[in-house]
Structures are given as structure tokens and as C-alpha cells.
Amino acid sequence: MLRYPISLSILVAIVLVACKPDTGHGNGSATSQDTLTHEVSKGFDELSSDYYDTQSRVIWQKPDIVIDLLGNLRGKTVADIGAGTGFFAFRLASNGAKVIAIDIDPRAIEWIEAEQRRYPVDVQALLETRLAATNNPNLKPDEVDVVLMVNTYIYLEDRIAYFRNLRQGLKKDARLIIIDFKEIETPIGPKVEDRISLSQVQSELTEAGYSIAATDDQSLEYQYIITANP
């Protein structure tokens, strides 16, 4: 699924979770982040440091716009594929969704589980972590209402086979939301030559058996949003 040695947690970004409560970590939080940064593969250091800065990411990623797009999440199950350290997962759970935070890197899973303990009990109860394989998101049949995949699509190797496999985990009326970088120069994100156009993503999803419900290349400055149905 990925071009190793880069993992989904690196690609999605090892970030501190912006929406967590202020528990007064001070320098201790920075030390933990520095330690994890040091341990991940070379690919982590090759990306802009701003990509990993949570406050900067809030500005360009506009998570509120993304979550508003998902509508009322209460009672819904959302799979956050490539969850990293939970930039979206914790926000989704805080909005009432049952969230499955999926990653192929055990370090990302451990990070989310450690952060999870800082949240109110009701939010903790809504968040589940799940280690996946490179070619399998590890979803149960008809398990989720929404799949959110942010800054991850371009790193999947056999994308059509992957998304065909993914369909088994989606309910009949489920939605797949893909957000990735436009093919333009941006101060954040992978090299332009490594990006995949909105039209190519549409074509590949169609080949994998999805119908395209909507596309949006205006709401986010650096990224496009594709909504598809199985």
C-alpha cells in the first residue's frame, strides 16, 4: 500500500493533536514530540517542518470545514485511514462519531492511545485504534458509515485493488471522503510531481467501483475534496 520506508503516520504527519484539552504539558509535550520525530524514518525529516506544526496545520487544513462536510456524526462510525496522531480522529470523536483510527505504524497507534487518556471519558469511549496492513484497512464487513482519508491517497501503491477491498467495510449508503494536495506549488505538502490530480483520483475510484458524488477544489486552498459512494 505504501512506498516504504515511509509509513502512513509519517505521510499524514506526526503532529500534536490541536483539539486536545490544555493540560499544561509545557516543555514535556515538546520533548515527547522531539523524541518521536527522532525515531521515525528519514522520510519524516524530508517534509516541511510546518507540516507537523499543529497550529499551522489548522490554518491550511481547515478541519472545521472538513467536519462540517461530514454532517451530523452522532451515531455514525467513521474510519480515519492514515490517522497519524489523531489530528482528525480526536475532532471527529469530540463531535460524537464512533471513530476507528487506522494506521499501519504501531508508533502512531501508541501515540493516539496515549493522547486518548487526556480526553473526557465519553470521548475516549468513542475512539478505537486499529493497526492495519499495507494492502488492507482491516475493516469488518459493513462496519463504517464514512471513510476519511486525508493526505494519504497519493502514497497507496495498488490503489484500485485497495479501494475495491475497502468497499467490503462500507455500509451500503456510506461515503468515502478523500482529501489530498492539488497539483500546484504549495508551501506545504509533497513535491508537485508526486501529486495525483483530482481527475485521476476520480477515474481510479470509478474503476474501483465507486460513484463520484461531489468534488470540491475551492474550499481548501491547497487541497481538493472528493466525495464518493460505494
Image (cartoon, rainbow, N blue to C red):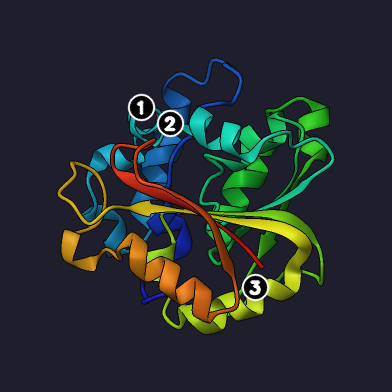
SS class of the residue under badge 3?
helix
Q: Is residue 30 above or below residue 5?
A: above
CA–CA distance in space, label 1 to label 2: 6 Å
* Quadrant of the rendered image containing residue 142: bottom right
* Quadrant of the rendered image containing residue 200: bottom left
Q: Nearer the viewer, residue 99 or 46?
A: 99
Type of amino acid at the residue the image marks with label 1 = Ile
Mark 2 sits on what residue?
A: 62
Q: Residues within 10 Å of mark 3 (few under 14, many from 20)?
A: many
Mark 1 sits on what residue?
A: 59
Q: Residue at x 47, y 27 (%)?
A: 28
Labelled disc at residue 166: 3
Type of amino acid at the residue the image marks with label 2 = Lys
Q: Nearer the viewer, residue 74 or 137?
A: 74
SS class of the residue under badge 1?
helix
Q: Is residue 170 above or below residue 189?
A: below
Q: State which tag comes first along the sequence, 2 or 3.
A: 2
Instruction: Tell me if 156 is positioned left or right of 115 in this view.
Output: left
Q: Is residue 6 visible?
A: no
Type of amino acid at the residue the image marks with label 3 = Leu
* Quadrant of the rendered image containing residue 44: bottom left
Q: Is residue 94 visible?
A: yes
Q: CB of mark 1 within 8 Å of CB of mark 2?
A: yes
Q: Return the x and y of residue 117 as percentages of the image width and height.
A: 71, 34
